[in-house]
Image: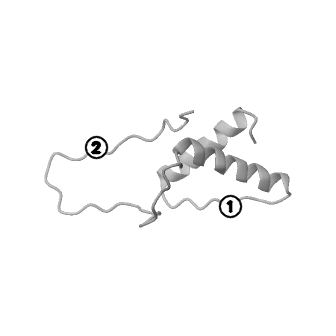
């Protein structure tokens, strides 16, 4: 399952860069080898489903436009597949 199709890689300008500023939310966190995009996507969907089924609500902070697009795409996919 590869549902993330809206994000593209960076296109660096041809000229020399003086500085690059990027968004980073994981910092120095080491990702376990058993974690993959697919396993984490399924874990996110399961967490959302369990929370909603338990009568709760879900708030997902998204600090960047592309991250928000990615979250919405995952939720849309989960709804289309009747996982939510």
| Whole-percent x, y for residue 30 in the image | 45, 61
Numbered mark located on residue 18 in the image: none
Badge 2 or badge 1: first in the primary sequence: 2
Q: Is residue 82 above or below residue 43?
A: above
Task: Give left or right: position of 62 versus 76.
Answer: left
**The C terminus: image quadrant:** top right
Give the Cα distance between marks 2 and 1.
32 Å
Q: Is residue 19 above or below residue 74?
A: below
Question: Which residue is at 81% across, 60% downward?
Answer: 56
Outermost residue toward the left?
Answer: 16
The colour scheme used here is one colour
Question: Which residue is at 51% across, 38% downward?
Answer: 4
Outermost residue toward the front?
Answer: 33
Task: Give left or right: position of 74 versus 18.
Answer: right
Looking at the picture, tell me which residue is in the foreground, 64 or 26: 26
Are the residues flagged by discs 2 and 1 in contact, CB closer than 8 Å? no
Residue under pointer 1: 59
Looking at the picture, tell me which residue is in the foreground, 18 or 1: 1
Q: Is residue 58 above or below residue 38?
A: below
Q: Callout 2: few (<14), some (14-19), or many (20+) C-alpha neighbours within 10 Å?
A: few
Q: Is residue 21 above or below residue 1?
A: below
Question: Which residue is at 40% across, 61% downward?
Answer: 23
Numbered mark located on residue 11 in the image: 2
> Could you say whether the residue bearing mark 1 is in a helix, strand or loop?
loop
Q: Callout 1: few (<14), some (14-19), or many (20+) C-alpha neighbours within 10 Å?
A: few
> Could you say whether the residue bearing mark 2 is in a helix, strand or loop?
loop
| Whole-percent x, y for residue 6 in the image | 48, 38
Label total for image: 2
Task: Give left or right: position of 30 versus 22.
Answer: right
Task: Give left or right: position of 6 versus 78.
Answer: left
**The N terminus: image quadrant:** top right
């Amino acid at each position: 399952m590869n549902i993330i199709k809206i994000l593209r890689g960076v296109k660096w300008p041809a000229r020399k860069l003086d500085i690059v500023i990027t968004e980073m939310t994981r910092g120095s966190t080491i990702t376990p080898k058993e974690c993959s995009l697919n396993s984490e996507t399924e874990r996110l969907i399961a967490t959302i489903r369990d929370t909603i089924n338990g009568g709760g609500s879900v708030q997902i902070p998204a600090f960047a436009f592309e991250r928000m697009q990615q979250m919405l795409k995952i939720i849309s996919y989960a709804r289309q597949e009747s996982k939510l």
